[in-house]
Image (cartoon, rainbow, N blue to C red):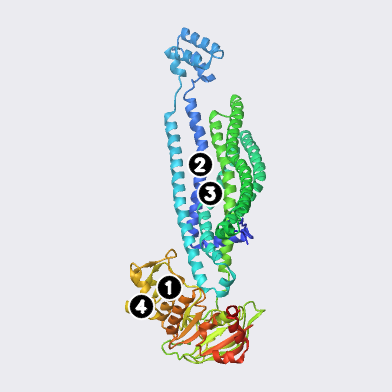
Amino acid sequence: MPRPGKRNFEKSKNFKGSIKRLLSTLKPWRSLLVISLTLAMISAILSLIAPNKLSVLTDTITEGLIPNLTEERITEIMADPNISDNDKQQFQILLATSKEKEQEEALVAIDALPKSIYEKIKPVMDLDKVKEIALLLTIFYVISALFQYIESLTMTHVSNNLARSLRSRISNKINTLPLRYFDQNETGDVLSRVTNDVDTIAQSLDQSLSTLVTSLTLFIGSIIMMFVTNWIMAITAILSSLIGFGLMALILGKSQKYFIQRQEELGNLNGHIEEIYSGHNVVKAYNGEKKASEDFDELNERLYHCNRKSQFLSGLMQPIMGFIGNFGYVAVCVVGALLTMNDVISFGVIVAFMIYVRLFTNPLSQIAQAMTNLQSTAAAGERVFELFDEEEMLDESHLTKVLDKEKVKGKIEFKHVKFSYDGKRPIIKDFNASVNPGEKIAIVGPTGAGKTTMVNLLMKFYDIAEGEILIDGVSTKDLTRENIHELFIMVLQDTWLFDGTVRENLKFNKEDVTDEEIKQACTTVGVDHFIRTLPGGLDSSLSDNDSISQGQKQLMTIARGMLEDAPFLILDEATSNVDTRTEELVQKAMDKLTEGRTSFIIAHRLSTIKNADLILVMQEGNIVEQGNHEELLSKNGFYAELYNSQFEKFSE
């Protein structure tokens, strides 16, 4: 069991199977998912096509800035009879000296040439082609942005609908799970599946799936486009980037252990803080402040060192990513310049490759992050699917017998009931009892004797292994759970009030109740005075933050049971969490609640069940004694031993 505050690094046990099953869950939205991923892919493809168009645009603009001094044009000028010999001579001098001059001086000299020659060689910008390419690039980028926007909206719609569907399925599943599941699993774990795991799946689907598709498309597409454009530049870009990624992988390998240690030390520190502050009174009472402070300092120091190392190494990631990009740019520019000088490529190709380097390096980190998120998604999916795969309660749609609670007489019989939670160790071995209508039955015995188990079997929270339980001669095996539950009122040890008004809490799941009936029930159990002291009376809101005593809560649950008005009553340790004075009030309220009902009372305080019509004494799953209080005491047996043991400390 992890200490409080310690984070668990969960990995999927079956990544492929979990992702496959998760995708099958997306079947209702498969068309939207395909559309979304297709749009993401098209958007990435448009981003890959754009650099080549930008390369052509760059070359077109460059050509429009350079004078036309090709061999053909020079020959044409020298042969033109309309150009004077003097102008031709100036042109020849310019051609002879242009290689020795700086570029700016050569351009100035060209501008000074005679008009007849300047008109032949002056730079001419193909504006129509520039406009065409610029418009095409604008369309590409606008469509790409629009597709990304639509893809984002679509994925958000799919992920939210999936989350809603999973939560609905979990809610329905929880209602069909047997009580055994909740006994064997922590409440926090079940809640985590409903909240954290579903949120993890939805967020990862919304962010990681489309990112993975886009990044893979950009990564593979950029490699293809680079080799199509120029294989020498492609190899240069890839090798320069891989050097940087190799360095990053080395650092990540070194830093991973410090991240794990940091989480472990953070969990240890949080656990220590929770222990010390939750038991602060004990620490002060035993003068343990110094030791607690020393332990805290030691844990804090260890966390500091792990944090320093992990943060230092993780802080290198961003500079390294910048280094990878910049190193790739430099390598592309150097090699590109050499190739341009040898007329292998144009200047526009260098511009295109500078974009391709970014399109090649960025997706790698995004792919790694997306795969990490998918691992978390697979792990969360496994936990959710584990819940879906849990065995459900038996289907009772074939059961047709119904007991009307208005007509039930109240007789219950237990005949040779046997039960085991795990199918191996028997809890109830051979339980036999007969309860007449209107009787008050107390079930007593040491912890683990099977008292609460018998109540759970009676309520059909668990199915009995052998024997049967009869209600008015009808076996519970022939009755649905819903039918049995509406025959019983249950008041448990743990009081349960939800956030809502007093009225809503008292008439829980029972709409046809008037305020007069509510007030009458509250007066009967003695909680009416407390309700009148509340600011809004029955309309007062209750929450966990309200200062309501345990006794007041218990009286309200008893009033709730009285409004239910069922023929059977179960009181399971209903007074165990209240003081002696409050116990008297609760006991009086319970006595009124038991009037006219067949009642089962489980109690450790044997003084509270003296007036029971029948006391069943249980030990190791069997009834070892039965009778009323006086009869059992006179036997001087196990019940007498239990009863007298509660008063031994007062007689010493």
Give the image location of residue 29, x and y in percent: 48, 60
Mark 3 → mark 2, Cα distance in angstroms: 14 Å
Q: Mark 1–mark 3 contact, CB under 8 Å?
A: no
Quadrant housing the N terminus:
bottom right
Mark identifier at residue 606: none
Mark 4 → mark 3, Cα distance in angstroms: 58 Å
Of discs 2 and 4, which sits in the foreground?
4
Does residue 443 appear to the left or right of 154 in the view shown? right
Mark identifier at residue 211: 3
Q: Mark 2–mark 4 contact, CB under 8 Å?
A: no
Does residue 509 appear to the left or right of 572 in the view shown? left
Give the image location of residue 558, x and y in percent: 43, 78
Mark 1 → mark 3, Cα distance in angstroms: 55 Å
Q: Earlier in the sequence, mark 2 or mark 4?
A: 2
Q: Earlier in the sequence, mark 2 or mark 1?
A: 2
User: What's the amino acid at mark 3?
Assistant: Thr
| Residue sitting at x 52%, y 48% | 41
Of discs 1 and 3, which sits in the foreground?
1
Disc 4 designates what residue?
Answer: 518
Q: Is residue 220 visible?
A: no
Q: Is residue 498 above or below residue 276?
A: below
Q: Earlier in the sequence, mark 4 or mark 1?
A: 4
Does residue 89 appear to the left or right of 271 in the view shown? left
User: What's the amino acid at mark 4?
Assistant: Ile
Give the image location of residue 497, x and y in percent: 44, 70
Q: Is residue 624 above or below residue 537?
A: below
Mark 2 → mark 1, Cα distance in angstroms: 68 Å
Mark identifier at residue 552: 1
Label 3: element kind: helix
Q: Earlier in the sequence, mark 3 or mark 2?
A: 2
User: What's the amino acid at mark 2?
Assistant: Ser
Label 4: element kind: helix
